[in-house]
Every structure is written in structure tokens, then in C-alpha cells.
Amino acid sequence: MNEREWREQIDEHESNHHELSPEDCPVLTCRLAAKIRELEGRLKRRRMFPIMDGPAVPWEAMEQHEGQAQQNHWQSLQELASRGGLDVLEAWCVVDAIPFRDCPDNVSQLWEDYAYHWNDLVRRAEADAKALQ
């Protein structure tokens, strides 16, 4: 089957509102498989930033926080990546724009801090809502 024939086949199925199956159009299936392989290859080549004891993250996710990384660690993201990246807590502090000196010692402390601030915000919002009534 040549390309013109399989395009006609697709058009015929679409005009009848018939959902295509792989059996209906093997050429389309092959092209789709090739496209999937191409996209998988691109993802594998995607630049990633290493996180120690964690999954790497897309470079773009860290790139926008390079200034904070420089402030916290006195190194560029490239330098940090070449040395193994950041641990989870360091990465969190960079992304949340928390100065290194204010980074908690462990993740549970970080969650406690967030919970405290969240509860404080909720209390203030409730107080504001009561004042408006």
C-alpha cells in the first residue's frame, strides 16, 4: 500500500466516523511507532539536572533558579551538576528561593516549617473572614 492509498483509507474511515484500529491501517501503525521511538529518543537526550539520592529533574526546572543556586552554593548549575548535583533539600531551597543559611537541617523540619506557615495563614484568613462578617 502506498502513501496515497493509506491516506484514502484514513479519509474513508474518518468520513464514516469509524475509529481506526491498528488492523485497519498497518502503515499508520508503523508510522506512529516510528514517531513514538523518535519522541522517546528526544526525552532520553533531554538535559537533566542530577539530584543526589533522587530522580534527576529537567534542566529547565532548575535553570530559572540559577541565581539562587549561585547565592546558596557559590557555583553555577553546570558546576553543581558536574559535582553530582544537589541533594533533595538543597534543590528544594534553591527552587523555593530559600537562602542556604535558612535551609532546615532535614526534610521533616522543612515540612514542619511549611505546616506552621500554612496554619498561620489559615488562622489569619479565618480571622479576616470573621472581621468582615
Image (cartoon, rainbow, N blue to C red):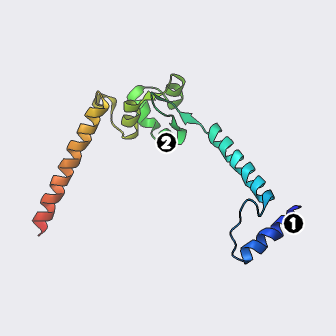
Q: Pick the quarter of the image with the C terminus.
A: bottom left
Going 26% across and 42% down the picture, which residue do you hit? 114
What's the amino acid at mark 1? Arg
Going 68% across and 41% down the picture, which residue do you hit? 41
Write down the residue under mark 1. 4
Image location of residue 23, percent across then percent down: 76, 60
Write down the residue under mark 2. 61
Q: Which numbered disc, 1 or 2, marks the residue that appears first in the sequence? A: 1
Compared with residue 24, is residue 63 higher up or lower down, i.e. above or below? Answer: above
Compared with residue 125, is residue 17 higher up or lower down, i.e. above or below? Answer: below
Going 19% across and 48% down the picture, which residue do you hit? 119
Question: Counting other residues with Cα less than 10 Å from the Cα at mark 2, is it few (<14), some (14-19), or many (20 or more)?
Answer: few
Image location of residue 10, percent across then percent down: 77, 68
Going 77% across and 53% down the picture, which residue do you hit? 30
Give the side of residue 54 with respect to residue 1, left or right.
left
In the foreground, 68 or 10: 10
Residue situated furthest bottom in the rendering: 16
Alpha carbon separation for disc pair 1 and 2: 43 Å
